[in-house]
Image (tube, rainbow, N blue to C red):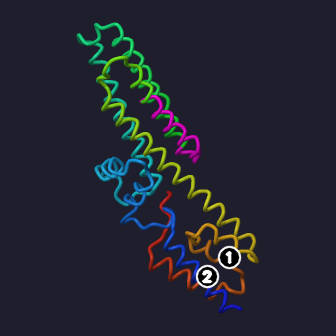
Amino acid sequence: MKNLFVIIFAFLVCQANAFRPILLLGNQNLIERTCKQTPFYDLCIWSLKSNPESRDASVKKLAQIMVDSLKTKATETLDLIDELLQDGLALDPEMQKALTSCAERYNVIIRGDVPEINEALKTGDYKFAAKGANDAAIEANSCEIEFSTKSPLTDMNKVVHDVSVVAASIVKIIQTNQNAIKQIKACGNFPGATLSCLLPYQLIPAMENWVLKAVPREANNATGSLAKAALSTSNHFPMLY
């Protein structure tokens, strides 16, 4: 019976390697794997790799970098709006109205959405953090449709929208990983049903002690050794914090 359990657990580990979530990735390709789960891969890669803080960063830190990028891009856009309001372009009443509305929307992003996202990331309220990033994307889109003629902010609005969406996507990855960790811990409370509990997730516990807790006591020695080998050779450790 013990040998059978080891064989089944080995199969589980192999399956986990083939279908593992971001939680189990190593540092070397974390950015690429993270960005592949966002709608704007190239923008994600450029934004993260151009920031030296992304080196050896956790997924949570990558999310923070994107939020910082969002604030920077939104501030640049607001500065452009202020410049446009001060020159002849704003003499057109319709253009002035649209630019003024956009200024209000970007102030909401900078003074409202970004601080809320940062606070939510600190407290671990990832659902609220993702909502804040999505709200910022909506504000950028809403600015664009304010213009009855060609918008002078099209490119900037798109960048802010896309950066916001990438930030929201990365936060959702963290939220998914957090839920997976909770499931792993829950599985550990029911040793008799461990395999049926873990198999739907196609993953192995991310930390060695969780591996040991997630298997029946009589199989700890055999599966524990296997788990240690799998974790050490595949370099799969959590990158959340």
Q: Provide the residue designation for mark 1.
A: 195
Residue 90 in which image quadrant = top left
Q: Where is residue 3 in the image (x, y as percent from the top left)?
A: 65, 92
The residue depicted at 31 percent of the width and 30 percent of the height is: 76
Classify 60 as above or below 69: below
Helix, strand or loop status at disc 1: helix
Residue 54 in which image quadrant = bottom left
Question: How much space separates mark 1 and mark 2, taking CA atoms?
Answer: 8 Å
Kind of residue at disc 2: Phe
Region in magenta: 121-140
Kind of residue at disc 1: Leu
Image quadrant where one finds the N terminus: bottom right
Q: Position of residue 5 (x, y in %)?
A: 66, 86
Question: Residue 127 magenta-drawn?
Answer: yes
Q: Provide the residue designation for mark 2.
A: 9
Drawn side of residue 210 relative to residue 51, left or right: right
Q: Where is residue 128 in the image (x, y as percent from the top left)?
A: 58, 40
Q: Are there few (<14), some (14-19), or many (20+) residues within 10 Å of tag 1?
A: some
Circles 1 and 2: CB atoms closer than 8 Å: yes
